[in-house]
């Protein structure tokens, strides 16, 4: 398999069978617009933002309490004003229509309790009861309701009830430590907290009662705490808290507060590995329209479909997962260790839940490949129409493994986006081919480009990923940033008037894209900028390498490669030389490391991202406490080996650099 090789092509009947195809036909019939191919559709979507987004509004049937005056009141970026005059509510679109009441909305699997299902009718009833309970506790529009909850139905019910009132939602998963929870939720001065007392993670039980007590102590604005029963047993209780049953014990009508398009819906948080996390405020209208577009037109989800995608409540994928209900499709909510008892779990679960779309992480794909897993031999995967992948770059070998295992009819939709816009920037759809090693193209109405150092667009070479025009789901603000200075510094200081995303990307001549990692972690050797992902794709092909991390210190021009080896394997001079030779021959001499070090673990955030920049700063003498919050790591002790190494290493002489 070679990069750019076509692995899947849009079928001849895609305009009749796919949602994006039906959208194109609708544009022709209702708007008199005719598009020869996806490229023409994309070009129209960015050239006529008002025409495109008004068509999304009409095609998906937005239920507004008050109509909008125009699509764009202001095109300024930052500060675009979308759909002024409109009054709506995101939650109203999440509970199905009257003919969906008996259809399954949620299939929940957990290692803490038995599987359960909720229909749209049952979801409506619980949201109405929770809404009544929240009102009884004094929650109203603009108040903050926060949760220390896993990915379970109660979390979704509480979120929708909160949104129905115009209150603002935020959540942390119960595996977060107290410091991380306080750094996030404490910024919002919440009125009400929902929490569990404990949970199961594989074969290990975690009692969180002490953590909840400390979180409550650190949130003096709280007026109420609600305990959500989950772990079971006599200890499944929080002293002084109200019960979930009490919150839902009163029937109520299902109503939705009419809100401005820009009214805050929820707050998402940046990773917070290097300081206080950014509190990113997303709005009702922006998330509603963007997720209808993304889930319907890019993911090709429609009524009767089902999405299974493992996520925790820390990641924006949770928000994307639950928004599947907007297109009246169902979701699988998974809580617990996704690799327990082994990496085959998610494939075996898919046989039970019968998803039409299965979401996976690139790291999961590569782990399955390394284990020699053959998914179709262990599970009936015939329900799967497409596989979505996001979170990090997928190596070419991952594409090859998926198509070897699942066959040539697989529609693989690899995408990249982020918490900042809570959606995709580049990804596939049923009108685009799947190219090996690449993301198929730009998302509709996302005016993305790669900019070179002088700020001009480049094609066929790496550049900074930027967005040149406003999107409805761009944050309305950061919390506690009254003059917008932190917001502007985060996205607009580098290229004024243009959103800088922070990824290093290459667009090909045919419109597909390759992301090689974060631009702040990009290697610069001899004036040539190199992405870290291509090094990982080579190194982690070694049978004895379980994980790796690469860092470049420009002042010393030293390239470090840290590797985690299989138990019993020693990093000797022979293995070091083999890795360096392989990187030279597979990539280039510039990719060969000067120093290779074995470590027990690679530090990763709870969403799976490698901490390249914090490790780089530790190696240059910055204290670990200044660059990383340990309770944001999958393994809090994983940073220790780097601290020790930084303390004891001797920088090489100029003659030694490059001699590995």
Image (cartoon, rainbow, N blue to C red):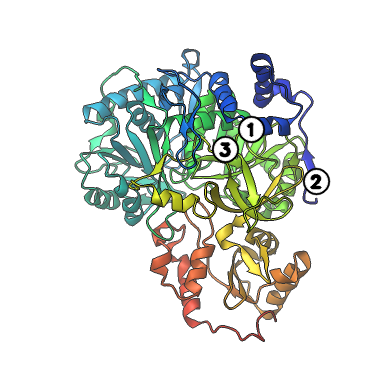
Secondary element under disc 1, as helix, strand or loop, is helix
> In the shown orientation, is residue 24 left or right of residue 143?
right
> In the shown orientation, is residue 423 left or right of residue 406?
left
Mark 3 and mark 1: span between their CA atoms? 43 Å
Q: Residue at x 65, y 77 (%)?
A: 594
Mark 2 and mark 1: span between their CA atoms? 30 Å
In depth, the one of 273 and 132 nearer the eye is: 273
Mark 3 and mark 2: span between their CA atoms? 31 Å
Q: How many marks?
A: 3
Q: Nearer the viewer, mark 2 or mark 1?
A: 1
Q: Give the residue at mark 2.
A: 5
Up the image or down, 329 lies above or below 234; here it is: above
Residue 139, percent across and down?
25, 31
Q: Earlier in the sequence, mark 2 or mark 1?
A: 2
Q: Residue at x 75, y 68 (%)?
A: 588
List the single residue furthest toward the top.
99
| Callout 2–callout 1 Cβ contact below 8 Å | no
Secondary element under disc 2, as helix, strand or loop, is loop
Q: Give the residue at mark 3.
A: 349
Q: Nearer the viewer, mark 3 or mark 2?
A: 2
Q: Give the residue at mark 1.
A: 47
> In the shown orientation, is residue 403 left or right of residue 98?
right
Q: Earlier in the sequence, mark 3 or mark 2?
A: 2
Kindly identify which numbered label has been placed on residue 105: none
């Amino acid at each position: 398999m070679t990069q750019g090789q076509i692995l899947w092509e849009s079928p001849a009947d895609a305009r009749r069978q796919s949602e994006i195809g039906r959208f194109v036909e609708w544009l022709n019939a209702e708007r008199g617009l005719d598009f020869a191919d996806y490229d023409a559709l994309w070009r129209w979507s960015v050239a006529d933002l008002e025409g495109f987004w008004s068509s999304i509004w009409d095609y998906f049937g937005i239920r507004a309490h008050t109509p909008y005056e125009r699509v764009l009141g202001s095109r300024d970026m930052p500060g675009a004003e979308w759909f002024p005059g409109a009054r709506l509510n995101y939650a109203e679109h999440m509970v199905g229509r009257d003919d969906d009441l008996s259809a399954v909305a949620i299939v929940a699997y957990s290692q803490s309790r038995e599987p359960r299902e909720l229909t749209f009718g049952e979801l409506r009833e619980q949201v109405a009861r929770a809404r009544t309970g929240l009102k009884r506790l004094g929650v109203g529009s603009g108040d903050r309701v926060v949760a220390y909850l896993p990915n379970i139905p109660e979390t979704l019910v509480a979120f929708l009830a909160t949104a129905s009132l115009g209150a603002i939602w935020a959540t942390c998963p119960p595996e977060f430590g107290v410091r991380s929870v306080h750094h996030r939720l404490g910024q919002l001065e919440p009125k009400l907290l929902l929490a569990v007392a404990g949970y199961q993670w594989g074969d290990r039980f975690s009692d969180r009662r002490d953590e909840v007590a400390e979180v409550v102590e650190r949130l003096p604005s709280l007026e109420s705490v609600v305990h959500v029963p989950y772990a079971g047993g006599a200890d499944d209780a929080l002293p002084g808290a109200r019960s979930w049953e009490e919150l839902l014990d009163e029937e109520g009508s299902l109503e939705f507060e009419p809100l401005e398009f820009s009214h805050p819906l929820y707050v998402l948080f940046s990773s917070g590995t290097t300081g206080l996390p950014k509190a990113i405020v997303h709005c009702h209208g922006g998330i509603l329209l963007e997720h209808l577009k993304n889930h319907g037109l890019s993911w090709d989800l429609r009524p009767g479909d089902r999405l299974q995608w493992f996520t925790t409540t820390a990641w924006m994928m949770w928000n994307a997962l639950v928004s599947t209900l907007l297109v009246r499709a169902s979701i699988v909510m998974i809580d617990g260790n996704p690799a327990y008892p082994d990496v085959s779990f998610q494939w075996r679960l898919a046989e039970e839940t019968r998803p039409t779309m299965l979401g996976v992480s690139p790291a999961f794909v590569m782990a399955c490949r390394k284990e020699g897993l053959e998914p179709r031999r262990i599970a009936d995967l015939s329900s799967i129409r497409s596989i979505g992948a996001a979170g990090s770059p997928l190596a070419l070998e991952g594409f090859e493994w998926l198509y070897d295992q699942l066959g040539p009819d697989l529609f693989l939709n690899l995408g990249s986006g982020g918490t900042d816009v809570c959606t995709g920037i580049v990804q596939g759809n049923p009108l685009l081919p799947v190219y090996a090693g690449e993301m198929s193209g730009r998302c509709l109405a996302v005016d993305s480009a790669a900019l070179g150092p002088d700020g001009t667009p480049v094609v066929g070479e790496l550049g900074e990923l930027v967005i040149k025009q406003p999107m409805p789901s761009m944050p309305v603000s950061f919390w506690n940033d009254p003059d917008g200075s932190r917001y502007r510094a985060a996205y607009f200081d580098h290229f004024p008037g243009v959103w800088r995303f922070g990824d290093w990307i290459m667009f090909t001549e045919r419109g597909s894209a390759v992301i090689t990692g974060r631009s702040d972690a990009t290697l610069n050797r001899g004036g040539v900028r190199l992405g870290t992902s291509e090094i990982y794709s080579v190194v982690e092909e070694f049978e004895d390498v379980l994980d790796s991390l690469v860092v470049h210190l420009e002042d010393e021009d030293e390239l470090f490669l840290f590797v985690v080896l299989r138990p019993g394997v020693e990093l000797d001079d022979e293995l070091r030389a083999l890795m360096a030779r392989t990187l030279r021959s597979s990539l280039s001499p510039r990719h060969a490391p000067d120093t290779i070090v074995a470590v027990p673990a690679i530090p990763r955030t709870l969403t799976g991202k490698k901490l390249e920049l914090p490790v780089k700063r530790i190696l240059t003498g910055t204290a670990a406490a200044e660059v990383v919050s340990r309770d944001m790591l999958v393994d809090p002790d994983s940073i220790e080996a780097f601290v020790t190494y930084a303390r004891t290493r001797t920088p090489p002489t100029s003659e030694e650099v490059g001699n590995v």
